Structures are given as structure tokens and as C-alpha cells.
Image (spheres, rainbow, N blue to C red):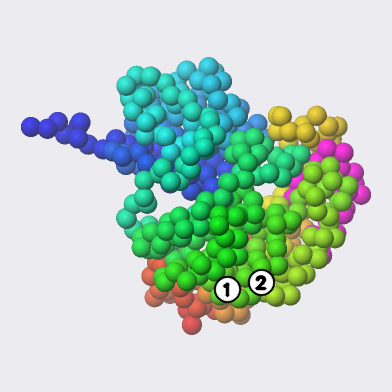
């Protein structure tokens, strides 16, 4: 007679930090580990994976703190395995195991297709470390997507790494050079996702509009648009220098491509942009926005900003404020500069932290005013919403509009996965309320 405990699936807990690409990576890692089911609590787990991000300030120290909090779990459950994956794993490597002996495995973002072999090694009582940049395509070595039903919106990584070497960024060092997945494999995975109930995909890449997997990004988007059942396409994150004419045209000629574009500029000061090694100017960025709005006037713009970059003056900051005023963002992400070890900007004269804080508050206040004004302007408009889950109130459903607004649908008849037309009735701080029409 079989031992029930032995046959029972092991439990996997994954904590995901940072970008959407890490969310996608966590999904693929979970799918690769046969014999595991996911759990929402670390206390129940037989294996814990921290899928880390190196973008935020003191990212490595925060991971070490988290590992310290998890060590008592291993003291209580010696067979528990703990792993660190992602960009901090790539940057820190063996140092993680040296500083925290409770860690059993460390794997970088380019090697997680080897996770099943590493898991077998740690189950045999060894440790496992892999922070290589392997020549083989990790995506081709991953097992196919599972056929279980899933949420109607999904991320799909099409490109990784970056060759831009912005002075503040660690991505080229942790994710490596730009690599694009072959278009046929992207299309195959998109089809698999649709078969599992997905209606919307967001194409991911550190520099997604530099995609060159046998097609340009515009050509890939048009090919995805031919998949029956796939209703919506988005992509992020883009670099202004790779926003070519054909991709701009796709926003006009591809109905499934949503009218939302995340296009980071980082600063409105040409002097700071040059010091950042961004290789575009504020003027070229503004003209690019004009060209995009010429073909898709209703497009919602989103951006990224770094405040207090080394040597930034008040005049430099004011140039950023002026650019934000001119563009009018529906969304924007703004951060106070923090040093990333090993990047060129880390060794430069730093802006006084209190001054950087004050500038960030002013910028965020402006962005918030713009966001609220755009949300208020949506009241009375008819939009399409992809229903993603039930709302908090009885009879209410929640989804995303084509402009990526969160929309609560009152007295809804729509089900999860439906795309429905609604009329916006109210604007709130971070969402909209609507009724079906």
C-alpha cells in the first residue's frame, strides 16, 4: 500500500518582487516543478522561492532580511528548501549562501529552466548555484504551458536584457544583452494561453520595442492579432529610440492593440538625459508623443521618472515638470534616485536627499492631478472592459478598460473573461465605476 504522505504533492511558495517579467518568470518556474502545488503561505511550504528584483534601493539587503525572517521556518521544518532566484540572485551569487546558510539554491533569471535539476540536487542533500548566461534558449527548454484554466489577462515575455546601459540601471548586468524569443514560439505560447481562457496578453521585455525575433514588434503584434479568441494586446516597457514608424502605425491599424503606451523618459532635462546615457532629448520625446497621438488621438500615455539623479539642479528638475505638463500622463511612475552598485551614476556627486524628497513630492502631486483630471473626464464615456474577477460588493465585477483603468461594474451580468461595453458613472481615486450598456 502506498504511503499517502509520500504520494501527496509538495507545496511551493513563491514570493515575487518587482516587475511584470518577474511575475511571468514565477509562473514558469512553478510550472516547471513537477510534483508541487502552490500555496499562499510560506509556513505550509516544502519549498520557498524568493524571485527577486534589483531595481529598488537596497534590494539585496531587503532580500537578506526576508531570508532572516524565513530561517526559523527551516529550524522548525528541516526538510524545507529555500531558494533565491531573479536579479538579486544573479548579482549576489554565492554570497547569498555565504551570508545565509539556510539557502539551498540560487539561480539567476537566465537559468531557471534548470530549476528541476537543481531541485533534485537539493533534495539529495546538496546545494545548487547557477548564475550563468547559458547559450541555450531557456524558453525552449521549459515544458509547455499547463492546460488548466487561468485568469483572462496574462503576461508573455518576448524579449529580455538590454544593450542601452543607462547610467542608473543594473539590467544589462543582471539580465544580460538583448535577446528576443523567436516569433513562432511566442505565437505558439500565446495560442496556448488563449486555449486556457486568456483574452488579453501583455508582451514583456526590458526593451520590448527592440524585439527582433524574426519579426519586428509591430509585425508580431499584427500576427498575434490574427489569433481567434485573443481580444487584446499590450506591450511594455519601451525605449523612445526604438519606437519606429511601423510600430506607431500599428496603434492605428491593429484594433486589438490597446490605446495605452508606457514610454519612459526619465527626465525632462537634456543635460541629465545625457548624463543618464539615455540618447534621446526632451524635444525628440515630445515630437514622438505627437506622432503617436496623430495616429491614435485617444491613447493613454504612461511614463517613468527619476528625481534627484546625480548633479540634478532645480532648473533640471523644472524641465521635467515642464515636460510632464506638456504630455499629460494618465499614469506615471516616479522614484527618487538611489545608487545601484556597479553602475556609472553611483560614483557621481549625489543630490541632497531632503531636496530630492521635496522634488519627488512636487512631481507626484502634478502627476496625481493629471491622473485625476483624466479619470474625471471618463465620466459619461462608453468603454470596453475585460472582466477579471468579482468586485467587493454583491453583484459587482471588476476589470480593466482599454485604457488600463480599473473599472467596477455595478449590477453586472457579465462573467469573468467577458469583454463588455459599459458607461462610466463615477471616478474615484484609483478606479472608475460603470454600468453595462
Q: Residues within 10 Å of mark 1 (few under 14, many from 20)?
A: some
Quickly name the residue at label 2: 249
The part of the chain drawn in magenta is 305-326
Q: Earlier in the sequence, mark 2 or mark 1?
A: 2
- Is 115 located above or below residue 269 in the figure? above
Query: In terms of image quadrants, where is residue 218?
Result: bottom right
| Mark 2 → mark 1, Cα distance in angstroms | 8 Å
In the image, residue 9 lies at what x, y percent? 26, 38
Q: Residue at x 73, y 36 (%)?
A: 338
What is the residue that sits farthest to the bottom in this orientation? 437
Q: Residue at x 36, y 24 (%)?
A: 121
- Is 410 located above or below residue 28 in the figure? below
- Is 178 located above or below residue 328 in the figure? above
Asked whether 424 or 113 is in front, the reply is 113
Q: Quick one: SS at disc 2? A: helix
In the rendered structure, the answer to whether residue 25 lies left or right of residue 334 reads: left
In the image, residue 19 lies at what x, y percent? 57, 46
Q: Residue at x 54, y 18 (%)?
A: 99
In the image, residue 102 lies at what x, y percent? 45, 20
Indicate yes or no whether the magenta region holds residue 46: no
Q: Residues within 10 Å of mark 2 (few under 14, many from 20)?
A: some
Indicate yes or no whether the magenta region holds residue 311: yes
In the image, residue 83 lies at what x, y percent? 45, 29
Quickly name the residue at label 1: 254
In the rendered structure, the answer to whether residue 369 lies left or right of residue 415 reads: right
Q: Residue at x 36, y 46 (%)?
A: 143
Amino acid at each position: 500500500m502506498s504511503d499517502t504522505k509520500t504520494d501527496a504533492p509538495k507545496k511551493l511558495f513563491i514570493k515575487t518582487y518587482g516587475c511584470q517579467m518577474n511575475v511571468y518568470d514565477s509562473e514558469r518556474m512553478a510550472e516547471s516543478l513537477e510534483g508541487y502545488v502552490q500555496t499562499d503561505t510560506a509556513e505550509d511550504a516544502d519549498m520557498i522561492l524568493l524571485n527577486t528584483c534589483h531595481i529598488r534601493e537596497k534590494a539585496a539587503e531587503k532580500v537578506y532580511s526576508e531570508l532572516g525572517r524565513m530561517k526559523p521556518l527551516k529550524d522548525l521544518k528541516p526538510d524545507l528548501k529555500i531558494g533565491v532566484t531573479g536579479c538579486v540572485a544573479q548579482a549576489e551569487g554565492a554570497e547569498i549562501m555565504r551570508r545565509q546558510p539556510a539557502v539551498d539554491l540560487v539561480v539567476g533569471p537566465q537559468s531557471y529552466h534548470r530549476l528541476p535539476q537543481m531541485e533534485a540536487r537539493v533534495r539529495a542533500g546538496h546545494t545548487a548555484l547557477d548564475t550563468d548566461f547559458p547559450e541555450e534558449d531557456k524558453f525552449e527548454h521549459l515544458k509547455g504551458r499547463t492546460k488548466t484554466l487561468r485568469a483572462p489577462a496574462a503576461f508573455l515575455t518576448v524579449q529580455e536584457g538590454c544593450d542601452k546601459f543607462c547610467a542608473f540601471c543594473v539590467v544589462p548586468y543582471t539580465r544580460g544583452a538583448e535577446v528576443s524569443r523567436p516569433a513562432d514560439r511566442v505565437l505558439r505560447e500565446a495560442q496556448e494561453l488563449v486555449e486556457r481562457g486568456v483574452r488579453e496578453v501583455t508582451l514583456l521585455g526590458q526593451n520590448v520595442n527592440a524585439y527582433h525575433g524574426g519579426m519586428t514588434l509591430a509585425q508580431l503584434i499584427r500576427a498575434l492579432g490574427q489569433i481567434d479568441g485573443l481580444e487584446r494586446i499590450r506591450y511594455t516597457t519601451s525605449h523612445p529610440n526604438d519606437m519606429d514608424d511601423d510600430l506607431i502605425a500599428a496603434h492605428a491599424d491593429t484594433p486589438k492593440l490597446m490605446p495605452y503606451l508606457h514610454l519612459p523618459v526619465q527626465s525632462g532635462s537634456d543635460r541629465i538625459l545625457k548624463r543618464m546615457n539615455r540618447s534621446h532629448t526632451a524635444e525628440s520625446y515630445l515630437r514622438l508623443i505627437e506622432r503617436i497621438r496623430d495616429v491614435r488621438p485617444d491613447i493613454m500615455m504612461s511614463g517613468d521618472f527619476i528625481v534627484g539623479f546625480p548633479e540634478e539642479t532645480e532648473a533640471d528638475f523644472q524641465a521635467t515638470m515642464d515636460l510632464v505638463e506638456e504630455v499629460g500622463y494618465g499614469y506615471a511612475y516616479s522614484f527618487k534616485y538611489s545608487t545601484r552598485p556597479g553602475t556609472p551614476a553611483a560614483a557621481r556627486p549625489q543630490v541632497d536627499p531632503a531636496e530630492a524628497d521635496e522634488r519627488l513630492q512636487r512631481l507626484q502631486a502634478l502627476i496625481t492631478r493629471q491622473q485625476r483630471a483624466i479619470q474625471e473626464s471618463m465620466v459619461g464615456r462608453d468603454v470596453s472592459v475585460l472582466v477579471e474577477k468579482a468586485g467587493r460588493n454583491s453583484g459587482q465585477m471588476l476589470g480593466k478598460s482599454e485604457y488600463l483603468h480599473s473599472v467596477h461594474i455595478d449590477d453586472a451580468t457579465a462573467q469573468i473573461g467577458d469583454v463588455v461595453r459599459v458607461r462610466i458613472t463615477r471616478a474615484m481615486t484609483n478606479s472608475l465605476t460603470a454600468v453595462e450598456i
